Amino acid sequence: MLWLETPTNPLLRIVDIGSLSAMARDRGATVAVDNTFATPFLQRPLELGADLAVHSTTKYIGGHSDVIGGAVCTNDDEWNERLRFLVKSAGAVPGPMDCFLTLRGTKTLHLRMERHCANAARVADFLAGHPSVGRVYYPGLPDHPGHELAVRQMKDFGGMVSFILADESIGAANRFLSSTRVFTLAESLGGVESLVNHPATMTHGSIPRDERLAAGLHDALIRLSVGIEDVDDLLEDLDRALARA
Ligand SMILES: Cc1ncc(COP(=O)(O)O)c(C=O)c1O
């Protein structure tokens, strides 16, 4: 099996689903794509040649940080049967309230994603032009190495933005992380409210440091899940936190 994730967490790298699926097919390998960051609204892995699209519905699909779940989607009958067998025999079945919250989330997915993308694009531009910021990772920025591919493969660039301060010390990152008021320091992502996260000590803290660094994940990287609030409130919050970093 070839397991892909695009955009990746937390460096927002873009992987070519179409060409990798074609290569995998030639070799008889199944292709699974973790589509959590993009959602089906922005990117459709099965149409690009993947066999399985996987989502943490905890994130954008639920959309309100109040339910945990996951989904595997396929257009392959054999995979469908195997997955259904697992669901009914292993008991991976969500409860009624979880289903209700997740289905309710799907009704506004398209509206929320439009706002997530619009706000994230403004945040990425703001950060890229700020003297206290060293590097910004957002596939919507023209200088992002995956930008051209993202234009072809995605409808828009998503709501996740990562960056490193110009002062690359952990101290500066910690001062920033403890200074935001609208962005809440928390691990999850994809909800209506904006969150800020420090991957090296939070979401990716269980990965050994040398492996993290080898993968390009800097100790001082900061990841934002840009919510759907008024964008001026978000920019003001970031500006204030940058001044204190
Ligand atoms: C890209 C991606 N896939 C999968 C998961 C796992 O999601 P869950 O916490 O719902 O198991 C996460 C969680 O952070 C994620 O970011």
Image (cartoon, rainbow, N blue to C red):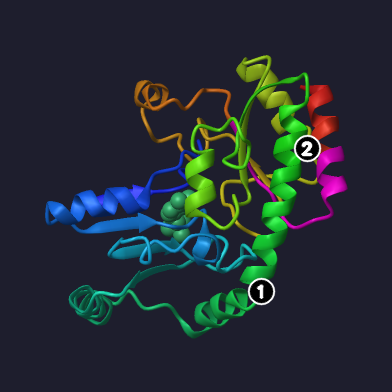
Please state the horizontal and vertical placement of residue 99, each as a whole percent of the image: 50, 80
Q: What span is in magenta? A: 222-236
x then y, percent, for residue 175: 73, 24
Between disc 1 and disc 2, whose residue precedes? 1
Is residue 135 shown above or below 47? above
Q: Nearer the viewer, residue 46 or 216?
A: 46
Foreground: 120 or 195? 120
Q: Residue at x 78, y 19 (%)?
A: 131
Residue 192 visible? The answer is no
- On-image quarter of the C terminus: top right
Residue 16 is covered by the magenta coloring: no
How far apart marks 1 and 2 lie (CA) works out to 27 Å
Residue pictured at 52% horizontal, 55% vertical: 154
In the image, what residue occupies the spot 69% across and 19% down? Answer: 172
Which amino acid, by three-letter code, is at mark 1?
Thr
- Is 18 on the left or on the right of 31, as rendered? right
113 sits left or right of 79 in the view: right
**Whether the residue under disc 1 has CB within 8 Å of ligand 1:** no
The reply to whether residue 70 is visible in this rendering is yes
* Residue at mark 1: 108
Count of all numbered marks drawn on residues in the image: 2
Ligand 1 located in image quadrant: bottom left
The secondary element bearing badge 2 is classed as loop
Residue at image point 57% right, 28% down: 221
Tell me: is circle 2 under 8 Å from ligand 1.
Answer: no
Task: Tell me the quarter of the picture where residue 224 sits.
Answer: top right
Q: Nearer the viewer, residue 227 or 47?
A: 47
Query: Percent position (x, y) of residue 198?
Result: 58, 34
Q: Which residue is mark 2?
A: 180
Amino acid type, mark 2: Thr
